[in-house]
Amino acid sequence: MSTSTSTISEEYVSTASRPSALRITDVRVANLHGVPFRSSIVRIDTNQGLVGYGEVRDQASATYALMLKSRLVGENPCNLDKVFRKIKQFGHHGRQGGGVCGIEMALMDLAGKAYGVPAYALVGGRFRDTVRCYADTPSLADPEAMGQRLLERKQRGFTMLKMDVGIDLLWDVPGTLIAPAGAREDKSTMHPFTGIQVTPKGVDYLASYVEKVRAVVGYDVAIAADHFGHIALDSCIRIGRALEPFTLAWIEDLIPWQFTDQWRQLTEAVAVPTCTGEDIYLAENFKPLLDAGAIRVVHPDPATSGGIAETKRLGDYAQERGVAMALHLAASPVATMACVHLAAATENFLALEHHAADVPFWSELVTDLPRPLIQNGEIVVPETPGLGFGDINEDLFRAQLDPRDPVFFAETTH
Ligand SMILES: [Mg+2]
């Protein structure tokens, strides 16, 4: 028998036991579609065989993540805050925040795996064992049909729902809108500048729509409303007041988030919780809205706001001002699990958006978590390291590759 003790194969050593020597060696992506939208999944590789997964925000370019590779290779992913501060200058509002945030999620996954703890433990532990999800629902012109769609989700166990209520319901109803020529096709002019006004008949139509939905769904479930359209503050106030009897969970994004004082005026004018934030990057940029008491619910998308730790900081800041935090998301289970850890660790968390209630294979995109992942409208906070799933489902990933750019963790030249 050999008496050599000079080498022991790495494969028999717990490589998760040397976090101080962990180094990032590569950053790669897989571009998926239909999960529910287009998403690039980030994989960070290391010198110890550990990999971490994150997700670039829906519909954003993978380039926002890949362009950070030169800043990441050689760094220790366990230095979460140091690495985040190094890369955060390369993010911005909306989809431009998607790369930094996807990387942050992957760093949290790696650090958790290196230390053998769930990601929530890296940001202070947890306040809850399950995370409440709310089901988004695509827009429908017929309120009876919308009511049935929401009722079906309620019967699947969701205790919170969201629907669209806005001027898209009014364009073909005579006498409900006053708008300049071309306004219907114009999706880029900001709300105060479109010149679109909702008439009293239009306000009544929207209130009647919500009343009919409530008649089907009942009043024992939370319902939020979104996508009111590019209308100015005065129309928003009149619609908000007309919706008061239906006890909505919140009305969302009626005004661009940049207009802090208009948000404050809306919030003071209506007795319905107001909500915005899905396109704001970094906690510091939420402060004007929160300091002004301009919203009742803050609604960051952790794939834009800064990932897990930065959004936890935002949640704590909002809590000091008496504002609840819900999470916007339209993602695969990868970013969803990042949000689950964030939600577990943030006391004023309200609910996490789920956009894939109609995607049957969605839970199977990752392994070693309950299927379906959402049961009775909730996700159980996992005890397993990092984001908590064992691995990605390679077969399903390959089946869902975006045909426009079907990259599967290929070598990059960045
Ligand atoms: Mg929204």
Image: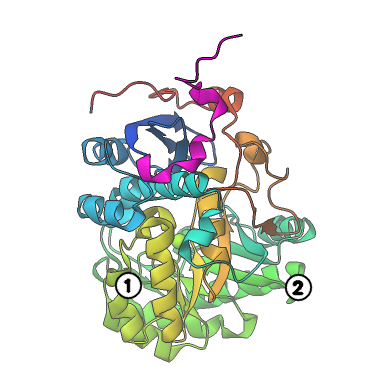
Report the image quarter containing ligand 1: bottom left
Q: Quadrant of residue 152?
A: bottom right
Q: Is residue 162 above or below residue 198?
A: above
- Quarter of the image containing the N terminus? top right
- Quarter of the image containing the C terminus? top left
**Mark 2 close to ligand 1, CB under 8 Å:** no
Q: Quadrant of residue 52?
A: top left
Q: Please tell me which residue is depicted at 37% across the width and 63% down the height of the picture.
A: 310
Q: Is residue 284 above or below residue 73?
A: below
Res 218 label = 2
Q: Earlier in the sequence, mark 1 or mark 2?
A: 2
Q: Nearer the viewer, mark 1 or mark 2?
A: 1
Left or right of 38 in this view: 160: right
Check if mark 1's residue and mark 2's residue have beta carbons within 8 Å: no
Q: Is residue 285 visible?
A: yes
Q: Nearer the viewer, residue 308 or 371?
A: 308
Q: Is residue 241 above or below residue 20?
A: below
Count of labels in the image: 2
Type of amino acid at the residue the image marks with label 2 = Gly
Which residues are drawn in magenta?
1-21
Using a 10 Å C-alpha cutoff, classify the residue at mark 2 as few (fewer than 14 neighbours), some (14 to 19) or many (20 or more): some
Q: Please tell me which residue is depicted at 62% across the width and 74% down the height of the picture.
A: 208
Q: Please tell me which residue is depicted at 39% across the width and 43% down the height of the picture.
A: 56
Q: Nearer the viewer, residue 385 or 206?
A: 385
Q: Nearer the viewer, residue 58 or 307?
A: 307
Residue 404 within the segment the image draws in magenta: no
Left or right of 192 in this view: 330: right
Res 286 label = 1
- Badge 2 marks a residue whose secondary structure is loop
Return the x and y of residue 30 as percentages of the image width and height.
43, 29
Q: Quadrant of residue 103?
A: top left
